[in-house]
Amino acid sequence: EAFAKAVRQNEGLLITDTTWRDAHQSLLATRLRTIDMLNIAEPTSVALRNAFSLECWGGATFDVSMRFLNECPWDRLMAFREAVPDIPFQMLLRGANAVGYTSYADNVVFEFCKMAKEAGMDVFRVFDSLNYIENMRLGIDAVGQAGGIVEAAVCYTGDVSDPKRGLYDLEYYLNFVRELEAQGIHTLAIKDMAGLLKPNAAGMLVGAIREEFPNLPIHVHTHDTAGTGVASMLAAARAGADAVDAATDAMSGTTAQPSLGAIVASTQGTDLDTGL
């Protein structure tokens, strides 16, 4: 609750850097080695000292590190935490699927989240690709019991700016956010995993959520597949989003996240200045 309050009180736009997780998962089949990231840990900890978080774990990183890189994902997380002690860490959790590709027993998910928190994780982005609340509820409860920050995601598809697009209209997303907020989440993520969120739609969606939930931190995630990522993130920020995802310039664009440098430069000297 204190974290969420601090996020809402923050002046300017907060940034999550996805370089250590989603950027290389999207561009390089998750093949960055632990040493690759440790080599840039010190400058990262300085450059991103004011960031919302550093996304560095979860998603496909867990199984790829073991199956293809012959590394231990737990050792990776603990090494990252030692090298970057002052920036919140963020991971992606697939609800009842944790970081795997099937549903696991409840006690497995609870113990996994407990171990992840103890190893250095802070923010757990919990999602289900079909917005199935029962799958997400297990992850939300497990993260909450472990003492982590619960960031529940609503997965975006369609186009809320086009009233003819059917099921996935503005009211659909507002209803799902209402269900998530009732679970006692700390922050809300809008997860645009297909890169479909256009600037106008971003403004509409974030604006509607902000109006109904003035105290709920909103964190927006997209992929720059269509090339509109920077514009969409700026539109979301102007509509009331507290944080957006971006990737370091060399690892940004196309199927990764929008350019961190472009967002930072576009907000400098404005009321959305990131402070980076």
Image (tube, grey):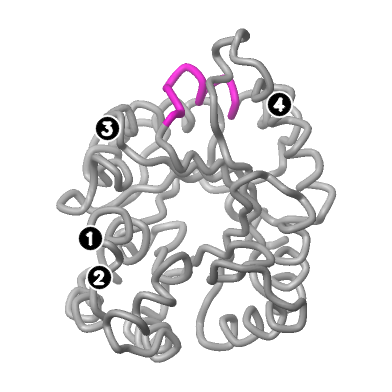
Q: Callout 4: few (<14), some (14-19), or many (20+) C-alpha neighbours within 10 Å?
A: few
What segment is highlighted magenta in the picture? Answer: 196-206
Q: Along the line of sight, which residue is nearer the eye, 7 or 73? A: 73
Residue at disc 1, secondary structure: loop
Q: Nearer the viewer, residue 152 or 129?
A: 129
Number of the label disc, if any, that sits on residue 266:
3
Secondary structure of the residue carrying numbered label 4: helix
**Within 10 angstroms of label 2, few (less than 14), some, or many (20 or more) residues?**
some
Q: Position of residue 141 (x, y in %)?
A: 78, 68
Outermost residue to the top: 164
| Residue at which label 1 appears | 28
**Mark 2 = which residue?**
31
Residue type highlighted by circle 1: Leu
What's the CA distance linking mark 1 and mark 2? 6 Å
3D distance between C-alphas at marks 4 and 1: 39 Å
Q: Reply yes or no: does residue 205 show up in magenta.
A: yes
